[in-house]
Image: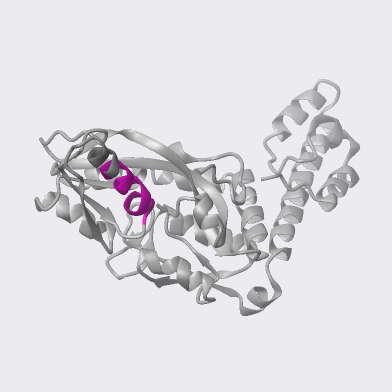
Amino acid sequence: MKAARLITTASVLAVGALSLSACVNNSATSESSSAAPAASSAAASTAPSTAASAAASTAASGAASAAASAATAASLVPADLAAAGTMLIGIDATYPPNEYKDPDGKPIGWEVELMDAVAAKLGLKTEYQQAKFDNILPGLIGGKYALGLSSFFDTKEREKQVDMVNYYTAGIQWASAAGKTVDPNDACGLTLAVQNGTTEALDDAPAKSKACTDAGKPEITILGYDTQDEATAAVTLGRADALSADSPVTQYAVAQSNGKLQIAGDVYDIFLYGMPVPKGSELGAALQAALKELQADGTYTDILTKWGVDGGAITDITINGAQS
């Protein structure tokens, strides 16, 4: 389904003003104090007092750089949104482990945790509103939401309607009932469960079915469901031969199925994930800056690693990076 690096003039001046010795041993673009041991070690070969001074200066410059960067992201938030203090986010929380609900109905998942961290960088709060996946973009375009969050694949077609702030990569992967061999490249005549509105439902499954009929073989019967939970259940209950979803979602479904599902084929067609915002909205640049800050301070990696999805991490936070 579902960037250029910011180096502010303020952060560079802050580093230079703090200590010339820190500038010798450290990059002005660093937001980390991890260089402090190196600076301290180098200075220790001359005098302990110099080492202490260099270490303190390095730590201070890192803090100043981080503070300047945070101020930059917050300053990019559109005035009306900053005044409101809260972002209303359209979400389809039925796509674990990316976004789903806890027993109390509260949205959770690695994307939700990442979005909350982004909002904190922007000085905003998050408010999630549950919606069907294929209703999120129309709602966003109509002004109902500030942005969407629901594992959106960034595609050229979607970029015609909204701007996409890229933060992750994932591909398409199938799963079948345990013990049933299914080949996504030779699924003619089978029944496939997908979630409505997804790339799997709109593009990939129809294309595979057409390839079958073009070759004189039976079509793939495509069963569309409003939620991924329903699509997954269609396979475990025997209504469909396989399901198709984003790779982290398929892998999670198999892991949580108590042996009822198995992976069917490799991951293919890798896409960037994008947070959709209204076309031309200043919020896109603010989200991009905040995500970069989360990369710089390690939060981005920590969240993905915690949820076991760090294999899709990216290094370059872009806007509208779709290749197809």
Q: Residue 75 placed where, x, y %?
A: 73, 64
- Residue 231 in sight in this render: yes
- Residue 245 in sight in this render: no
> Does the magenta-highlighted stretch encompass residue 204?
yes
User: How is this picture coloured?
Assistant: one colour
Residue located at (73% from left, 55% from top): 67
Residue located at (84% from left, 33% from top): 49
Q: Is residue 65 left or right of residue 184?
A: right
Residue located at (77% from left, 30% from top): 39
Front residue of 176/190: it is 190
Q: Is residue 285 left or right of residue 238?
A: right
* Main SS of residues in magenta: helix
Q: Is residue 97 left or right of residue 61?
A: left
Q: Residue 314 placed where, x, y %?
A: 54, 40
Q: Does residue 81 sit above or below 122 in this rendering?
A: below
Q: Is residue 136 left or right of residue 239?
A: right
Residue located at (51% from left, 73% from top): 145
The furthest residue to the top: 45
Front residue of 318/156: it is 156
Give the tally of numbered discs.
Answer: 0
Q: Does residue 99 sit above or below 103 in this rendering?
A: above
> Does the magenta-highlighted stretch encompass residue 319?
no
Q: Does residue 309 sit above or below 45 in this rendering?
A: below
Q: Residue 291 placed where, x, y %?
A: 60, 52
Q: Residue 246 placed where, x, y %?
A: 35, 46
Magenta region: which residues? 198-209
Q: Indicate the quadrant where residue 224 lies.
A: bottom left
Q: Indicate the quadrant where residue 55 lies.
A: top right
